[in-house]
Each structure stands twice: as C-alpha cells, then as structure tokens.
Amino acid sequence: MEILRTIHLKKYYGEGETCVKALDDVNFSVEKGEFVSIVGTSGSGKSTLLHMLGGLDRPTSGEVIVDGKDIFSLKNEALTIFRRRKIGFVFQSYNLVPVLNVYENIVLPIELDGDQVDKAFVDSIVDVLGLESKLYALPSQLSGGQQQRVAIARALASKPAILLADEPTGNLDSSTSQDVLGLLKVTVEHFNQTMVMITHNEEIAQMADRIVRIEDGRIARSAESPSANARPARGGESHA
Amino acid sequence: MRNVRNRQAVKRLAAKSFRANRTRNTIAVIAIALTALLFTAVFTIGLGMIEDTQRSAMLQAGGDAHGAIKNITEEQYEILKQHPSIVECGRDMSVSYGIDNPEFLKRHVEMHYIEKNIYPHWFIDITDGKAPETADEILLDQTSLELLGLEAKAGCTVELLLRIHPDDKPVKRTFTVSGVIKPAQGMNVGFAIVSEAYAIQYKEEMNAKGPEYYDGVGQLSMHVLFSNSMNIQKKLDRIITDSGFSLDEGSPDYIESNANWAYMSDGAESDPMTLIGLGSALLLILTTGYLIIYNIFHISVIRDIRFYGLLKTIGTTERQIRRILRRQAFRLWLFGTPAGLLLGFFTGKFLLPLMLDISRLEGPTITAVSPHPWIFIGGALFTVITVLISEQKPARIAAKVSPVEALRYTEQSGKRKRLKKTTDGGKITRMAFSNLGRNRGRTAVVICSLSLTVILMNSLYTVTSSIDRDGFLSKMILCEDVIGSAALWNYDYRPFDEETAAEESLSESFISACESQESFDDGGRIYMTPNHVRLPVESWEIPDHVLKDESGAPGRETPAGFEPYAGYETGGYFAALHGIEPFVLSKMTVVEGETDKDALWEKLQTGNYMIYGVQVDDNNFVMESDVKHRAGDTITLRYENGDTKKYEIAAVVKGHSFSLTNRMINDFAYYVSAGEFKEHLSDAYLMNFLMDTKEGQAGAMEEFLKSYTSDVEPLMSYESRTMYAGTYDQILGIITLVGSLLTAMIGFIGLLNFINIILTGMETRKREFAMMEAIGMTRRQLVGMLTAEGLYYAALTLIFSLAAATLFSLTALRALGDGIWFVNYRFTLLPVLIVCPLLLLLGAWTPRIVYRLRKQESIVEEIRE
C-alpha cells in the first residue's frame, strides 16, 4: 500500500538567472512499512524534499500525497493539524521543548491535538527506547543520544502514517549514532512504521530498505539496500 | 601602537554588533530618552523651585546686591565707594513713609530714590519710558498705575498723597510718569522710584525728624556687589574699616552694614521637604530606568552569547568585551539623551508654575525657569549613571562566558537540577507558565517594572483621597466668612490708639450690611489690641519648658534665632487681648479646662475669667513649648490706664492666627467677653467679624462680599471658605495632574519593558516555535500560549502589586498620613482593582499584537537558523 507519493514536485528559489532549482520534478513514492534513505551531497535538495514531504514548506508546483491526501490542498492551520496526526519528525538538533520533561515532550503532539494519550502505547515506545528512568528529566539534564531518543519517541507517539528523519544522528558521535540508529530501526520495525530518512552518510543509508539518491534537485538513482534482504521491497519505483 | 590597533578592533566590533541589534536599539533609545526626560523634568522643577525661593528671598530683601551699608552721608558714600573690593555699588533712599492714596490701601506702594545703575539688582525692569531725571518725574509699576485707574504708559501725570513720616499730615504732590516698571512678582507691594533731583530737593523735609528716626526716611543706604557671595559680612566690615570708619557701635564713626540674607542659605537647605521630594523622585526614576535598561541589555547579551563566546575563543579579553558593551551603552545613551533632555526641559517648564503654585501661596516669583546648564548636565549625568549601572551585570555575563559553554548556552543551564514530576505540562497554559520561569530574574524585573506603576497609582490615589478637605479648610478659616479691614490682611492690624484704629479696624456698617443679607445665619465680633495690655513680668511664673536666654528672659526660637518675649525688659509682656462674642467662642477648640461652651460663656461674662489661646504647629497640634498657662491659673493684667485686674484661666483653646487673631504671632493671647473688653478698652478696636451663612447660601454671601468690598467700602476686605476651597481644589488638581503624569511616564516605561520581553521572547524562541509547528502546534495554539504567557505576567503583576501596595500603604502612607494634620489616612486598593481588567487586557493583547507585527518567516527558515 502506497503511503506517500510526490507528483512533479518542484521548488524554485528566486527568478530568472538567479533561479535555483532546489527540487526539479521529483516523482517518488514510499510503501507502507518501508524504510527509505535519501542521500545526497549538501545542496542537493534532500532537505528541501523532506520539508516538502512533511508539509513544512510549500512547493512551487506539484503535489505531495500522504495517506491519500494532497497535503498542499490544505490551508496552513489544517496542514499543521494533518501533520501532527500523520507525520512524525525527528530533527538533527532534537528540538525538544526545554521547559517540558521527557514524558511531556513525548506526548506533546497528542496533547496539542486534544487527544487522550494512549498510555499503553506510549509506555511501549518508552520501553523500546529505554527511557523509563528518564521520564521526569528535563531535556537539559539529558545527553545528546538520550535527547534524540526522546525526539524519536515523540515522533512515534501519535502513531503517524510516516516518520520523517532529517540527519537524526548528525549531532551525535559515531558510537551513539549507531545506538540511536539501531533503536530507530528496531522501533520502526516493531511498530510497523514507514520511515524516510535523510543522511549524507552512506554507511547509515545502507541500513535502509531502499536508498534514493538525489543530485541537483533530481532523483538520480533508487536502489535496494543490501541490508534489506530480510524484508522484500514492495515496489515504488521512481524515475529521474 | 598595538594598543591603538586593538582599540580600533574593539570599536569596530562594537559598531558592528550595535547595528545588528536594531530592535534592541530602538527600545533602548526610547527607554533612555524617557529616563532622561524624567530626570531633566525633575531637575528643571527642582532648580526652578530653588530659583524661586532665592528670588523671593531677594525680593523680600530688596534685591540681589550682596550687602548694604546703612544710614550714611553723601560724603561717607563717596569715600566708601572707592574701596577696591567693590565691583558695583549704588545708593538707595526711602523718600516717604507711605503713600496714602486710597487706591493703595490694599496694596501698599513703597517710594524710593534708587541710583539708576543698580535698578537691575532691585529687579526694576522698565517696560515703557525711561528712568526719572527731574524732581517731578517718577517710575511706577504697572499694577499701581492700573489701581489709580490709569493706562500703564509713560507720560501721564499722577497725584500722590505722600505721608513723609508716620505721624505727618499727607502732602499732595504731582508727578509725571517717566516710565512704567514690571510689578514685583510674588509680592503684594508696588514701587515708586524717583530721581536724585527729588532726593536733593526734598532733603530738608525728609531729615526733619533727624537722621536716626526709626522710619528710615531720608537715610542713605549703599548697596554693594562683590565678585562673589562668599563671606559677605567680612567684606563689608573690611570696606568700613579700610575707609577709616568704625564697627564699634559706640564710636562716632560707627557705620552699620549687613549682608543680604538671601545669600545666607542656598535656598534648598531651608526646605527639607522639597529636598526629600526631589531625592525620592530621582530614586524612583533611577529604579524605573534601571529595570528596563537592565532588561534590555540582559536580553541582548543572552541572545548574542554565542557571539561573545566566539569572541573569547578568538582571543578577546574580558575587559575588551566589557568595553564593547560599554561603547554600545554609551552610543545608545548618546542617541536617546538629547531628545529626552529637550522634552524633559519643556515638561518641567510646563509643570513648574503649577508646582510653584502649590508650594507658595503668595504666588510664584518666577514665571519661567531659565535653561540653566545644570539642568541638562544633571539630566544627562543621572541618565548615564542609570545606563552604566544597568549595563554592569549583563556586561559581566558576556565577559565571563566560557567559549565552550557559549555554544551550548541555554538560559536554563545549571539552574535546575530537580526533576519535573508532572505529566500535564504539555497543556498550553501549563507550558506558558513554565515559559515564564525560564528566566525568573528577568520575569521578576518586568513584573516589578509594571507593578511600580500600579503601586504609584494606588499611593497617589490613597493620598489624594485621604486628604481631609474640611480639616484643611478649618486650618485656614474657622467659619464660612471672615470680614475685616484691608489692613488686617496686610498684616497691619495693630492699632496704637483709637484714632489710628479707625483706619485698621472693621466698620460696623459692613457688619450690619452682612447681617441684613438673606444668606446670613450667625456671626460674632472679635475686638483686639496687641498694644494696650501688659502681663506684668512678676505675675507670670515661667514654666520650665519655656525657652530662656542667658539672662533668664523667656522667649521663643525663630528662624533668626532666639527672640525674647516683647516687653520683658520693660517689666510687662505685651498681651494681645481679644474681646469675643458667643459665636466666636462656639468656633473655638478647647484643649483644657471648661469644655461646655455655655458654662464657659457664663464664666466669661462674669468678667473674672478669660480664655488663653495657645499656639499650634503646622499640623494643628498644640505647641507644647508655647503652653504658658494651664486652666485654673490666675494671672493679672495691667491696662494702659493703670487698671490691673485678676483673671482666672477658664479654658485653654487652640489658637488660629487667621481667624482668631490679627494674623501675627502673639505670645500672650487672651480672650475675654466683648463686654469686658469694651469696659477696659474701647469698641474702636474691632478687628474682625466671623460669620456663617445659611445652608447652601455661601455663594450668595460671597457675591455680596465681593461687590460690597469693591464698590461700597473698598477699605474693607474679607475671606471665605469658598475662596480657600477653590485654592484647595486647585492644589489637589495640580498634585493629581503631576502625579498622573509621572505615573503615566513610568507606566509607559513598564509597558515598553513588557513589550520588549514579549518581543525578544518570541525572537529567541523562534526556532522552538517553528519546531512546535513542525510537530503539530497550530498558530492558533501558539498565539494561545503567548496570550496565556501575557496573562500570567498580568496576573503576577496584580498579585505582586496588591501585596506591595497594601504593604506600602499600611506602612509608609499611613505614617505620612499620621504626620500631616489634614490627611485622614484611609486604606484603599481601588486603583489596583480598577487597573485590574486593563492590565489583563494588556497582558492578553500585547503578545498577540507583537506576534502579528513581527516578520513572518516559513517554518523551514526558522528551524534552520
């Protein structure tokens, strides 16, 4: 089942000679349960793509369909609400709310939605990510790896349709990176989540089911990762 | 060379980072300008008041000359004026004891010959025409000319009735008005100036009584100005001795001199209330300024902390960072101060006359304060002090930051080690409250800043609403109206004999005219003379608390020093005897003895009893040092005709110099019945008449009195409760106006502080907001959170204000109220309650408006920053 699709997605900055084509006619899709890495050098447009997928920025033209919904047909307010229900974000710089403790940070998107917190579900996330002992700590009392684990928990807590991760280990040292990535992958699998992750690190990208390479705003190559043997890829071919 | 280079670098850095902080700069410049405005306004008013005090002292002293050498001859003058220490000097001579034109009865005119070159030092300012030259030319002030019914222009002729010496018959003399001078401000006196030619022509007539006659007419004085006002008396003495004259009173060459007492004090020290007022105003402004400027700098330093960390990483020293910040502070001060100084000066200029109206009942002596450099120096200096104090701590934070920490510096770091054991912190309102706690110090500063206004407003209202109008009015006047002769209000009621009394006393015709008025209710006469009754020294045993000098003479302390009671040397103190009618008695406040007024009146009517009036202080409390008799004491009075009579003091009452006596201090004030008074003295000494009007008819009586005293008997005058009520309302209005202006200013600064913290709060949390939006916080929820934050500020301000205002009111204001007799302290928090919805509205809307106005960026841009 296709959970995400982009159709002729374009994002141009500036006009005329100074026009920068950050995204130039990107078409690609992600199946439910799939783990996709998007790799590219800096300036290739990979972050722009992720922002478009998450509805953080509006494209110059084209569509993004998430769970069957053209997200840019929504007004800002509705888009935000759609986002908190359907999309989970993990950022490079954790971005936790400093005045809230770990538990409050995790359930924040649910609270913002005015929903009842699925206690059991949150507990299971906390359990998988090993955060039980830190629930009442404030972000400033945590290490970088711990903070990123909280961010992952937060992204998962609202049971989103898709998880978007933007260089989730960019601020962490390599061993912590391995821990966090391992946890991320395990968690995604455990909760049968779909995930799109941006990275410029080939080694990290290899952990995904599929790697999408982006160059100069265009998709260059899409390949199945060697590590994806255990789980057969389910279609979702895209063309440059 | 190196040093110079690094200074250049610091300069450049300071300039660059200055430009990068546009919003901070705008708010800081406004805050500094407002602070400078307030300081300058206070200095303008303060200096203006001192100027006014000095000026009025000089006016009373007769000018701004440093000193005068008195009663000299022309020959002596010629010798004395040669002295090298004299910078400027000139002659002055009183040429007539008085001018008897009836038009001048309510406003006396003094007549002098004054040498032309010292006109400016006598504040003689010719507005039309020129100085007199011939003997029949004269300078008159504008008001005097108008009183004579003439147009205030040079060239007209006036006929003056001159009473050369006190007991002379007036002579009629015609003058040509050579010029018009400005009336002396703040004094109810006119001036007539004649030429030297006049002084020479009428020399004989003026010296008819001999050169030492007490009225001073015809006696030449020399007014002297030195290069400065130090040691004036010493310099005067030097002139006299150097010129070969003597300072010894017994010597034939004796010459008397005295320094101008206006130079004796600097005007400020004589008025501690003004000084305390000024001091607390300055402190209040300093605090207000500190609260906002500190906050502005603190916020900007925290925001740029990475920048300072970076500077340290690349080798900038602490001192250099401090210097960078100080340079920025100076630059902001430079931008903000000029406008503040200018606006402050004009604000002060506008308020000064109003303030002078309050402090000086006779009216201000200066109309405008001059733009004295000290005003601006003071304003600028105090502003720079405020800025430097405010900048201290933020600069220290910036200087002390370690390069490593700066990179991960979050405002909460290291502050909180406790765990936060809540699970519902994600609720918008809870989150908002937590946000206030991010920097508690700064939040506290904003709350203080806002509360200051509320507390000030509450205090102002408490004081103005606690003022006891009736209490204030009864200090001024005991009944509805008092009528008397114009002389009484000119402090001239002290009849020598029945003949002169006719000019100073109240006419029976005026009383009957009043009594025939529909609005008249009741009234009573007071007969009085200060000159005809003595209290034999031996008949009064001096109580221990009465002050005495070395020789044992009793007396009282005056601003000029100890003054023995008049008449002690001649064996009998002057007693001011008053004869009163029952209505007057009903208005008296008995402090000791018989309190039943009917019984008291019966006692007075026997002729064997009297009432003793004790002096009261400004707060209407009995002056213990003035208590000379107790109820039950028996004293003997000696009348002028030789009669002596024993009286028992039936009661002691509070004195009232405006209503119950001749408006002067009488050391021994006794009240007997009118009948008793007339039996021993005369009904010619009718001083005044106290009366009340029928309910609600005070206005009608007031109108009658006004027209009667100007048309029927112009020599009579009156004063009424209505007049004082008008003055009172005006004073209260001015206090309210000035207080409100100050409150408004400080309130505006508080609001600015609030806006600043909201604005910078939004800017520093931009990324956090973007992230929250990314994870699903809608803008509506965000605005809701900001609104909640604003409301928490408002609520905390209210709680703090309520507590602080209550505390302040119950301590300081209550103490103040207890100290001032016409203030009846009443606790109130009404202004806080009134301001409550306003503050909440402000708290809710300020963040919303600021949020709308700020530059909108997309989430992506903000998240990336």
Image: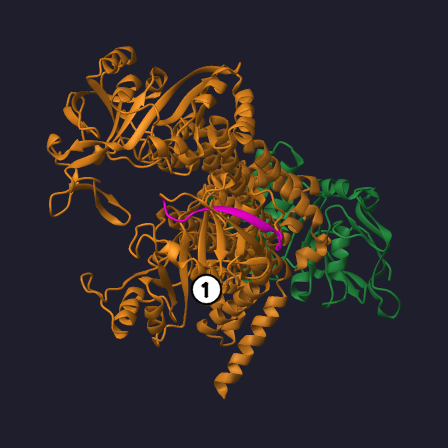
Q: Secondary structure at mark 1?
A: loop
Q: Residue at x 56, y 66 (%)?
A: B334
Q: Position of residue B662 (x, y in %)?
A: 35, 32
Total numbered badges shown on the rendered structure: 1
**Location of residue B366 with respect to B396 vertically, above or below:** above
Compare residues B79 and B10 and report the one nearer the observer: B79
Q: Position of residue B818 (x, y in %)?
A: 34, 32
**Location of residue B519 with respect to B326 vertically, above or below:** above
Q: Colour of chain B?
A: orange
The segment highlighted magenta reads: B153-166
**Location of residue B350 with respect to B124 vertically, above or below:** above
**Location of residue B63 with respect to A105 vertically, above or below:** below
Please say whether residue B11 is visible from this viewpoint: yes
Q: Is residue B416 left or right of residue B292?
A: left
Judging by colour alone, the chain drawn in green in this rendered image is A
Q: Is residue B194 left or right of residue B213?
A: right
Q: Residues within 10 Å of mark 1 (few under 14, many from 20)?
A: some
Compare residues B863 and B442 and report the one nearer the observer: B442
Q: Position of residue B644 (x, y in %)?
A: 16, 25
Q: Is residue B149 left or right of residue A230?
A: left
